[in-house]
Structures are given as C-alpha cells and as structure tokens.
Amino acid sequence: MQTAGAVWDIEGLLGLRGTLQELPSNSSPTTSDKVAEGAVDSASRGAATPPAATAAATTAATAVATAAEPAGAAEGILQKARQDNAECAIIWAKDIKHSHANNAVCNSGASAFDLSTPSRRRAEQQKLKHELLLLRRRQQVEASALRAQHDAKVAAAKAAWEAERRKLVYKNQTLQATVDQTLARYEEDVRLLGEVRGSVLQAQEQQQQEQQKLLQQQLQQALQAERDHWSARFKAIQDEWSRKLEDERRQAQARLHQAQQNRVRFSIKEMK
C-alpha cells in the first residue's frame, strides 16, 4: 500500500532550516530609518537656528531615533517565527521518515500475512493511525506558520505606525518651532515700530477701531432690518394661513349644515 507521504521530499524538508535562515532580510530602508535620517539631516541643516528650534529638533530627533525599537521587535518576532517553522518542518520530516519505515515493514510483510488475518488488520490500522497523526501534525505546522506570519505582519504594521506617529510628532514640533520664531520676530518688529512711530500707530489703531465700530453698527442695522423684514413676512404668512383655515372651517361647517338639512329632508320624504 503506497502512502500519501511517499512522494514528499524528506531531504528538502530537512534542509528547510538552512533555507529559512539564509533568507535575506528586507534591504530597503524602513520607515523608521528614513525618519531618523530625515531628523538627522534636519538637525544638521538647522544648526544655526535659534535655541527654541534647536531644542525642538533635538527632542524630535531623539523621539524618532527610538522608533527603531518596534521595528527591531518585529524583526525578532519574524526571526523567531522562521526558527519555529524550521523546527516544526524538521519534526514533520522525521515523522514522515518514520512513517516510510513503517510502511516499508508493512509492505514487506504483505506476502507473509493475509489481508483477512488480525495481525494484518492491526498493521493496517496502525498505519492509518500514523498517517492520521502525520496529517494532524502537518496541520499544526501550517497553523503555526500562518500564526507566526500573522504575528510578524502585525508587529511590522505596529512598528510602521509608531514610526509614522513619531515622524508626525517631529514635524509638529518643527512647525511649532518655526511658528514661535515667526511670532518672536513679528513681536520684535512691532515693538521697534512702536518705539519709532508710536503716535502714528496709535492714530491708525484709533482710526481702525472707529472703522470697526462703524462697520459693526452697520452690520447690526442690516441684521435688524433683515430680522424685521422676515418677521413681517412670517406674520403676513401666518395671518394668511389663519384666514385660509378660518375660511375652510366655515365652508366645512356650511357643508355639514347643508348635509344635515338634506338628511332631514330625506328623512321627512321617507316618512311621508
């Protein structure tokens, strides 16, 4: 009896550990590496920036540098999954080899035993049980490989998300430093202009305030006129609907009264 495992490549399965260990890692730079390089370049380019920007860039670069830790954890999980898969494959290959030995023994004894004898049936039963065990172990190996692959993907996605988050934090800190510098320069310019042309600025501010007040008054007047207009329209519509409802109510009462009179007349005619 030829088993299903007879066509499996045992030597190839035994060499799976070396194949998995020799797999090249992803040589392309990860997101965390790119972010770290961007942080270092930004820090080197901003060496002449004010202290606030330098501190923000240093803090952001430190935060981005730690983003490589989740990526390293993901790589460790992937390496552990590869080792587990290799070990499971080796165990699986050993079981297949043992199954081949049992099959050879059973096949060699086929001429000495009849299929109807209890010993032959027990041998066939043991062979089937062993094949079932091999199938179960194969399912376990495949499930372990899928689980390890899923864990590696989750860890890689988490590392990428963490690197992206730290990159956004770095961008936010850099932008905040730029905004602070701009505001500081603007305040300094305003202070200098105020010292040189204080009276002119005060006159301009007063004029602007008066213009704002005038615009505010005009806006309030326009809003009040619009409010009065819509209030009048709403009241007119409400009065019109009230008149229509009153007319309909009167017409309905008239029709009801006419119907009652017609009913009374019809009743009188029937009585006659």
Image: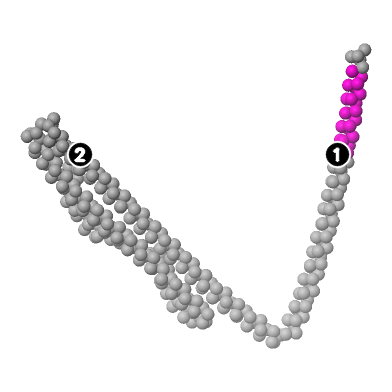
Residue at 66%, 81% (x, y): give it.
190
Question: Circle 1 — which element?
Answer: helix
**Residue 59 x/y as whole percent:** 47, 76
Name which quarter of the figure residue 130 lies in: top left
Q: Amino acid at mark 2?
A: Leu
Residue at 37%, 65% (x, y): give it.
71
Residue at 81%, 69% (x, y): give it.
214
Magenta stretch? Answer: 245-267
Q: CA distance from mark 1 to mark 2?
A: 91 Å
**Residue 114 x/y as whole percent:** 10, 31
Residues at marks 1 and 2 touching, judged by CB atoms closer than 8 Å: no
In this rendering, is residue 61 above or below 152?
below
User: What is the crowding at mark 1: few (fewer than 14 residues within 10 Å), some, or many (at least 20)?
Assistant: few
Say which of 204 and 224 sits in front. Answer: 224
Q: Which residue is disc 2 drawn over? A: 128
**Residue 216 x/y as whole percent:** 79, 67
Is residue 160 highlighted in magenta?
no
User: What is the crowding at mark 2: few (fewer than 14 residues within 10 Å), some, or many (at least 20)?
Assistant: few
Q: Which residue is disc 1 drawn over? A: 245
Q: Residue furthest bottom?
A: 196
1 or 2: mark nearer the eye: 2
With 114 as the anchor, is 222 left or right in this view? right
Residue at 10%, 41% (x, y): give it.
105
**Residue 135 x/y as whole percent:** 25, 44
